[in-house]
Amino acid sequence: MKYSIAIDGPAGAGKSTVAKIAAKRLGIPYLDTGAMYRAAAVACKQNAVDVKDWDAVRAFLPFMNIEVRYLPTGEQRMISDGEDITHLLRTEEISQGASLVSMIPEVRDYLVELQRKVAHAQAVIMDGRDICTNVLSDTPHKFFITASAEERARRRVKQLVEQGQPADYETILNDIIRRDKQDSEREYMPLVCKEDTIKIDTTELTIDEVVDALLREVRE
Ligand code: DC
């Protein structure tokens, strides 16, 4: 694999599921960059730094120490200040915190540098919001994976119900709409789909169909 694969798209569109399967099939590492913004939000929370207070986050940034580690199985773990915080990343509070902290240019610059280091050594598959437009803008393999907000909310409800957790469709839909707006309307490196990027709408597709479509394009 000569070139890396870049995937962008809104929250809950299935990017990471597709990227993980494609990475296995291609035998290359997968980097979930959303997990890095989530780790930054957790680090702020643990140090009582308000993610809405940009100056406070900027003052904390020199002390932020985020690392990506891979288990032998290929699973990505997020480390903050030496502590594995992966189990803390997937709450609604941290989803919202990550979206807020990702608006701050200095936070983005810090994490993008880490992302580029991972991609420097070898071809990778990476997903996020600014991967096609910024982090891996040189790669010819660029994808935008999306689905309607309603479908993404339905999938999230199903996932939570399967985990035995409470799930309210309206609340989840509103969270998704708010996060989409924040991620695509922020000033610095917003989520956008440019003309050089292949858009895949997954609303009516299965995961396998999306993976097949992506790999077909890459192989061509
Ligand atoms: O993909 P995710 O839901 O785990 O991402 C969490 C938040 O991080 C998302 O709301 C926006 C931000 N993010 C970003 O700004 N840029 C990225 N490359 C990845 C995520």
Image: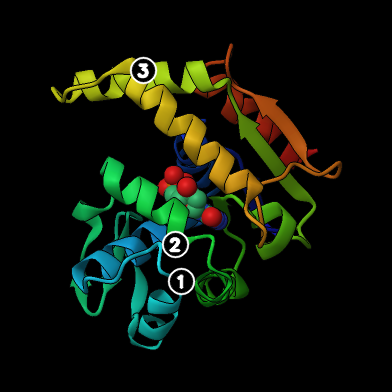
Taking the spot 66% from the left edge, 64% from the top edge, the residue there is: 135
Horizontal arrangement in the rendering, residue 82 relative to residue 148 (left or right): left
The quadrant the C terminus occupies is: top right
Instruction: Identify the image quadrant of residue 133.
Output: bottom right
Q: Position of residue 57 (x, y in %)?
A: 40, 75
Q: Secondary structure at mark 3?
A: helix
Which disc is residue 170 wearing?
A: 3
Horizontal arrangement in the rendering, residue 6 relative to residue 177 (left or right): right
Cβ atoms under marks 2 and 1 closer than 8 Å: no
Which disc is residue 54 wearing?
A: 1
Does residue 50 sit above or below 168 in this rendering? below
Which disc is residue 162 wearing?
A: none
Q: Secondary structure at mark 2?
A: helix
- What crowding class fits label 2: few (fewer than 14 Cα within 10 Å), some (14-19), or many (20 or more)? many
Q: Between residue 180 and residue 128, name the one nearer to us.
A: 180
What residue is pinned by disc 2? 101
Taking the spot 38% from the left edge, 77% from the top edge, the residue there is: 56
Indicate which disc, 2 or 3, sits on the residue closer to the N terminus. 2
- What crowding class fits label 1: few (fewer than 14 Cα within 10 Å), some (14-19), or many (20 or more)? some
Q: Nearer the viewer, mark 2 or mark 1?
A: 1
Badge 1 amino acid: Trp
Does residue 150 sit above or below 141 in this rendering? above
User: Does mark 2 have its CB less than 8 Å from ligand 1?
Assistant: yes
- What crowding class fits label 3: few (fewer than 14 Cα within 10 Å), some (14-19), or many (20 or more)? few
In whole angstroms, how far apart are the C-alphas of marks 2 and 3? Answer: 25 Å
Badge 2 amino acid: Val
Taking the spot 19% from the left edge, 53% from the top edge, the residue there is: 87
Does residue 69 sit above or below 117 in this rendering? above
